[in-house]
Amino acid sequence: MLDAYPTGFFSASLQDLTLKFEIAVEQNVRLFGTTFNHQRLSTSIPCFDTLVWGQSSRSFSLAPDGAAKFTTVQDKFEPYWTESVQKTWMEFLVWGQSSRSFSLAPDGAAKFTTVQDKFEPYWTESVQKTWMEFLGPILDQDPFQLCTENIPTWTTAYHMLVNLQIRGFQTGLTVFQCANNLALLGICREPTCTELVTWISKHKHLGAWKAIKTLDFVTDSRQQGSKQPNLSIYAIFYILWKHLDDSLTDSDKQILGFGPMFVEHLLCKVRRYTKRWLDYSKEVEKQENQQESNAAVWEAGKNERDCFVFPFPIVLKKDEIIKILESYDVTA
């Protein structure tokens, strides 16, 4: 379990939460007016943005593409350290495609006019009652001091969030990541391979499922349309998790917060990085040839001495996959 504790982001009441956002909104209005226009700004200014998550921009990648004008990491970050920008500030433009469900600016689908209206659904009596029933014996306790058996499972937490019927937290990645955050905070257990595969099997339009196809794994088409999780996905996910679990050092795992949750997150990035790492196919082919000829033997932990060495073998041979499947642990 990762060490994580609630921070000042959390509020004790609807009034406290509303006040925090009202202060930020008032500051934004003073700076930009009621309609944002970046042309009015001559320098970077302190501001709070409520819209943060989404698809990142290639402008912030360390992998140069056709539009990038840098060749080293230092070249990349030099513009951030010029005299004109060496001031204390928070950028008001956080990159990514945000969801209007989480905006403080009402749109056609929103049914609120004030900040308090926005957050009231999170504080209704029924919502608070559901949370109290969910927490049970860990209510007002430090979950990191309790036995794992007393902590709700990830699946229980996920379904609890969905059943709250709060707009924006009923489907898709938001409620999924919310359940993951509860696990990181110790409020529920971290998800198992089985729990995550069950979720992935029901969300074939999202990154983890697409990554399995990108990595050229073959799934069992006979289970398409079935309400039961695809058994071949269980095998594939377990292979990847076990491969990393056996290869990464304890130091690697601590840095990554390694576990099934990390593997799902890693899968979500596969398609993006195969597109950005233009020589990915060539590198894989190179390593395959090296493994076949035994020209280069992968060594566990060597990456801690040589930053150019992968922390795990990129190529998995058939006999290694069979060995992993034979070691299958139903508790993983």
Image (spheres, rainbow, N blue to C red):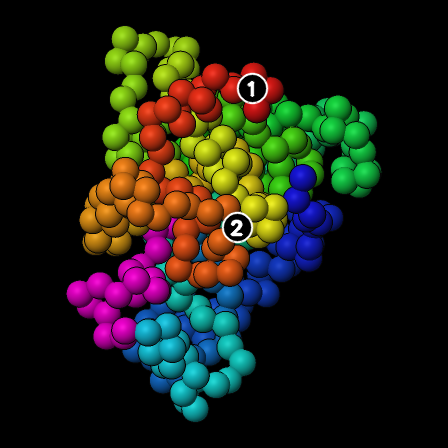
* Gap in angstroms between the C-alphas marked 1 and 2: 25 Å
Front: mark 1 or 2: 2
**For the view shown, which residue lies furthest in the left direction?**
66
In the image, residue 75 above or below residue 163:
below
Q: Nearer the viewer, residue 115 or 261?
A: 261
- In the drawing, does residue 209 fall left or right of residue 2? left
Badge 1 element:
loop
In the image, residue 190 above or below residue 45:
above
Q: Which residue is mark 1?
A: 329
Q: Residue 237 sits in which quadrant?
A: top left
Question: Magenta-highlighted stretch: main secondary structure?
Answer: loop
Quadrant of the rendering where the C terminus is positioned:
top right
Q: Position of residue 151 (x, y in %)?
A: 72, 28
Residue 61 belongs to the span the image colors magenta:
yes
Q: Nearer the viewer, residue 55 or 316?
A: 316
- In the drawing, does residue 245 fall left or right of residue 146? left
Q: Tell which circle, 1 or 2, labels the residue nearer the N-terminal end.
A: 2
Residue 102 can be seen in this image: no
Badge 2 element:
loop
Q: Position of residue 281 (x, y in %)?
A: 21, 45
In the image, residue 206 above or below residue 269:
above
Q: Nearer the viewer, residue 104 or 180?
A: 180
Residue at 35 percent of width and 42 percent of height: 314
Residue at 69 percent of width and 55 percent of height: 7
Q: Which residue is mark 2?
A: 301
Q: Residue 109 sits in which quadrant?
A: top left
Amino acid residing under circle 2 = Gly
Q: Which mark is residue 132?
A: none
Q: Position of residue 331 (x, y in %)?
A: 60, 20
Report the magenta residues as a range: 54-71
